[in-house]
Amino acid sequence: MRRHLLTTAGALGLGLLLAGSAQAQDLNLGGTYSITGKDKSGRFRGTATLTQDADARVTGDLQLEYLRWSWSSFSYAPSGARGSARLDAQLRGQTLRGRRYTTTGLSNVLTGLDNAESFQITYGVALDAPNAHGSRVKSVGGRFDGDRGQDSLRDHRPSAPTPPPPPAGNDRIELPARLLAVPGAPEEGRQAFTVRVDGSAASLSIAGPGRLLRAGAPVSGALQLQPGTHRLELEGTGDGRVTVSLRRGSAEVTRATSESAVERLYAILWGYQGTEIDYLEGDVAKTLRNVLPHLPGYALIEDGASFDQRKIEDALKDPTNPRRVVNDWCVSREDLFRYLRRGTLRGIAWGSHGFMEPFPGCPDEELDLFESRVWTAPPSGPRTTDKKTFVREWRDALAASVRTHGPLDFALMHSCCTGAIGSYRDEVWNYTDATTKSRARTVLGDPLPTHDRLRYRSFDALQPQARYLKTYVGPSYYGYHDVNWTHIRNSLEPSR
Amino acid sequence: MSRGLRALALALLALTSAGPVHAQDTPWWERPEAREEARRTLAQVRSLMEATERGDPRPAAAALQDRAWIVRSIAVIRLEVLGLDAGTTEALREQADPTRPAPEDDSKPLRRAREFAAALEVDLGPPVEVPPREAARIAASILTERVKGGPPDEDAAAKRRLVEHLLAWRAVVPEKADRAWLARRLLGLTDIDQALDDLKAQTAARAVGEDGDAVFTWYRSNAPYLYWHPRERRLRVDVAARVARQPTAEFRRATPWGPEEGPNAPPRETDAQR
């Protein structure tokens, strides 16, 4: 026991001392966490869901994914093995005492706990300033099974609080537990909810980072509702708790709350691959291997080789976890701008063919200005071309995300000529849109100017929008052996 | 397509394309020295990736004088990833070309790269293992870029010679799946439409099968008829030359391409864009 206490105290560190016991009086550990740690089977990561009752008894469900070291990616990667565990403990102050049960393999964890391997635990709770989800719980954790086991629960997302007991009447507000705030496209996080008004008219109002809508139109001020059941809509607008209240006169007759969180999105996007489509599977795997393990608590959303965009769209609508990584194997221009328009990007990796040419429809005086552009792919698959998207379009669209979250952690523009024309200088006009080329011949003369008499604008123009930006002078290589993954990993700040 | 049908298609193809141009010696890529060099090249690529993934630039700097241009090329790319300056990289990249010799000892960019490697202070990471499959794919990527992006006046024979490295590597990669992947890459650099038609396969995956053998056989019997299509940036089959059973270079001396034919024809697909 002494050893546990000492270890726990060490793990808690400064946060515990600063937090003070007064803050712990109304501590509620209920909610979800990301978890990392180890047990006798090895290192793991995963999710933990804790519930806490009125007597401060805490039970926890731990879903674990074991990891093993990968020399090829120089990082831990899922081994394929999974496990689960259960916590049953009592919270006193900032200490959680009880037992940890290894439930892997048990068909019924509720009846089988007596037979499960278990360990006594004394875990510490560290407090800090409220996180993005309004929780002061910085971490919960400690050791078990001697020095062999360790749990570290972080990134606490509190459970939506239990609604207050209904008043004597039958007025009701039924809110979704979580709201997703998508600042650039708020309708993407819109959810329906119902209000039942009983007896006489009442007014509905909202407090916190949310917005009420009726039939798709925003509601300003209090909304007068006649008796009956009303179907309304709600959008998150920021991080924090949203409270919807129903009043008659000055008396609040019922209320409900929901947790709103701004989406944090990392996008790994694959456009037109052409005949190099045979690299796609390997390049996707390599990118995920180098990025995902360094984004703990983030959910992976992807379409896979089916290129089925509905899989991604459905998953993006789910507000359960606002932290997500989209890996889209086939990005059309429409897909691309739907992601960019959300205004929630925290990092982006783009992979496709690319080149430079004057912007189609540009004024005559810009016909000698070659701008980097990359190809999207049609929904049917990335072997063929869809549309070209130019630097100016990317820069304008990324501005929404920078307004929300500040500069992206990284932008990897893995296409040829995203940094400069480079060794393709002698074929600089070869891939220019036919209409543009014809205009250029009229305006600039025939033969067209050689590369050294042209001006250039590359994706280096995104520099202020990303803390780490990688572009390519001339060729970029399928196989992604020209990517410095260490720089990308070091750029990641998943918890901000 | 069933195995039997494919065998029949290959037999028919061999019969219809058989002729004086096919009665040739063992192709260069099947000779022992070519296989040995293929083995050495892929091993070097693998070894350079393993070293540089740990942050060690020195083997890459040493490989800048390797006799294989692909090894020189991967060395330059990896040094750039580790921070070698753009000017030196550009100069070394120009030397890492099949038409150029390895740089001499007194080459200025070579000296600068070696100084960079010697001066770079890094805490080496733990050992990294790069699978042989990965080395072959990286080498094929460098090869693809060079074939598609080489000088515009490079003739078809030179392009073919480059592409045929894929056939040399086929003999030294460890598994059927790797050979199949190389065959798929071969289709990407050659006349995929004609190959699928000749092999009576609906898709590239079916043409390749589990080991790529049908595609390699197809290439061998069609190699003399391949011409370079500059806008598709791939080798295509000169079907008229094949019917006449004359290598395309010889056939087109007597029967030149029309203004809308062969290399002068507009690209037939949209998968060869930049």
Image (tube, coloured by chain):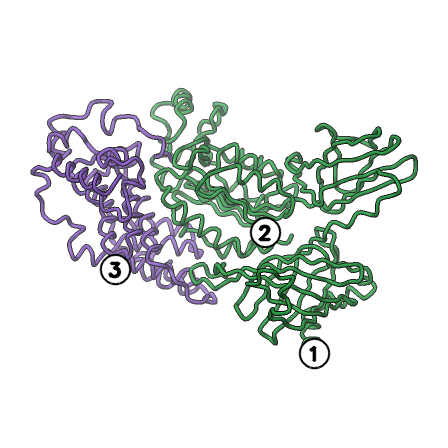
Chain colours: A green, B purple
Q: What residue type is disc 2 on?
A: Tyr
Asked if both marks, 2 and 1, belong to the same chain, the answer given is yes
Parent chain of label 3: B
Parent chain of label 1: A
Residue mark closest to the camera, 3 vs 2 = 2
Residue A23 as seen in the image, left or right of residue A392: right
Farthest residue to the top: give it.
A442
Of B174 and A270, the residue lying toward us: B174
Farthest residue to the bottom: give it.
A2
Would you identify the image quadrant in which residue A434 lies?
top left
Residue B16 as seen in the image, left or right of residue B64: left
Residue A14 picture location, percent across and down: 72, 67
Parent chain of label 2: A
Disc 1 target residue: A1
User: Considering the numbered disc 2 on the image, is that residue within a helix, a strand or a loop?
Assistant: loop
Q: CA distance from mark 2 to mark 1?
A: 35 Å
Q: CA distance from mark 3 to mark 2?
A: 42 Å
Would you identify the image quadrant in which residue A250 lies?
top right
The answer to whether residue A285 is above or below residue A38 is above
Disc 3 target residue: B40
Farthest residue to the right: give it.
A250
Give the label on residue A81, or none.
none
Residue A157 picture location, percent across and down: 69, 53
Q: Is residue A372 visible?
A: yes
The answer to whether residue B74 is above or below residue A9 is above
Q: CA distance from mark 3 to mark 1?
A: 60 Å
Q: What residue type is disc 3 on?
A: Arg
**The N terminus of chain A lies in which quarter of the figure?**
bottom right
The answer to whether residue B76 is above or below residue B234 is below
